[in-house]
Amino acid sequence: MESTSFLHNRYWVLRHGKSIPNERGIIVSSMENGRRPEFQLGSEGVNQAELAGKLFLKELEISNIAFDKVRICYSPFSRTTHTAKVVATVLNLPFDGPQCKVVDDLRERYFGPSFELMSHDKYAEIWDLDAQDPLVGPEGGESVKDVACRLASALVSMESEFEGCAILVVSHGDPLQILQTILSATNQHKESTSNDLVSRLQAVQVASILSQHRKYALLTGELRAV
């Protein structure tokens, strides 16, 4: 992805490590279930998070970024909290300190009651819905547009709170795909006359752009600069 020069901070995204729901092949997307401790990382996921932390550390060193400029913003789900905690340990940052922050708007996309705790096989139905119309979600769940709106809000909040920082965003597959989609489109939207980040992010939340989010897929534990 092209450098997001319109932002005040540098961003990396990290999908959580392989979780117990991943191992069991089930969809855990509600806040209620997502926070349950039994749905945190499996042992392979912990290893992935440690590796991601080491890779992030290397990127910080290459870019000559001081540790006091590092921020970890993470989803409140147990699998993302666990991932962020492992990375903080690798970086030797206190997880309960000011450099690590839980952000509710980075939570998993809620796929609705008919998909919750069901098999991963049902994701294919969701991707089909998204391709047809990303403005309409599964029944009782969030559409791509719904998630894009709250991720844009999270980004605006981080941009207003931090300046000149290296921000690691620890979230989930769908939200991170959608975040990358709107960031890339906003960066390419050169003809925009507005310097207002809110307006620029809103302008790209259209079906033709949002329906492409699957091309930004991340593996579990994958770190990516955006």
Image (cartoon, rainbow, N blue to C red):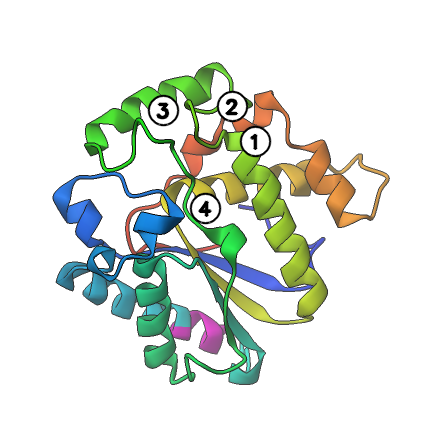
Measured as percent of width and height from the top left, residue 117 is found at 23, 37
Q: Look at the numbered disc 3 and give the secondary structure of its residue.
A: helix
Do the numbered discs 1 and 2 sit on residues whose CB atoms are within 8 Å? yes
Residue shown at the point (30%, 72%) measured from the top left? 86
Disc 3/disc 1 C-alpha distance (Å): 14 Å
Sequence-wise, the earlier of marks 3 and 1 is 3
Do the numbered discs 3 and 1 sit on residues whose CB atoms are within 8 Å? no
Q: Answer above or below: position of 172 versus 56.
A: above
Q: Residues within 10 Å of mark 4 (few under 14, many from 20)?
A: many
**Residue to which mark 3 is pinned:** 126
Q: Look at the numbered disc 1 and give the secondary structure of its residue.
A: helix
**Residue to which mark 4 is pinned:** 176
Residue type at the position of mark 4: Leu
- Report which quarter residue 174 is drawn in: top left
What is the span of residues highlighted in magenta in the rendered image? 57-62
- Looking at the image, residue 159 sits to the left or right of residue 72; the answer is right
Residue type at the position of mark 1: Lys
Q: Residues within 10 Å of mark 1 (few under 14, many from 20)?
A: many
Residue shown at the point (29%, 23%) measured from the top left? 124
Disc 3/disc 2 C-alpha distance (Å): 10 Å
**Residue to which mark 1 is pinned:** 145
Sequence-wise, the earlier of marks 1 and 2 is 2
Do the numbered discs 4 and 3 sit on residues whose CB atoms are within 8 Å? no
Sequence-wise, the earlier of marks 3 and 2 is 3
Sequence-wise, the earlier of marks 4 and 3 is 3
Sequence-wise, the earlier of marks 1 and 4 is 1
**Residue to which mark 2 is pinned:** 134
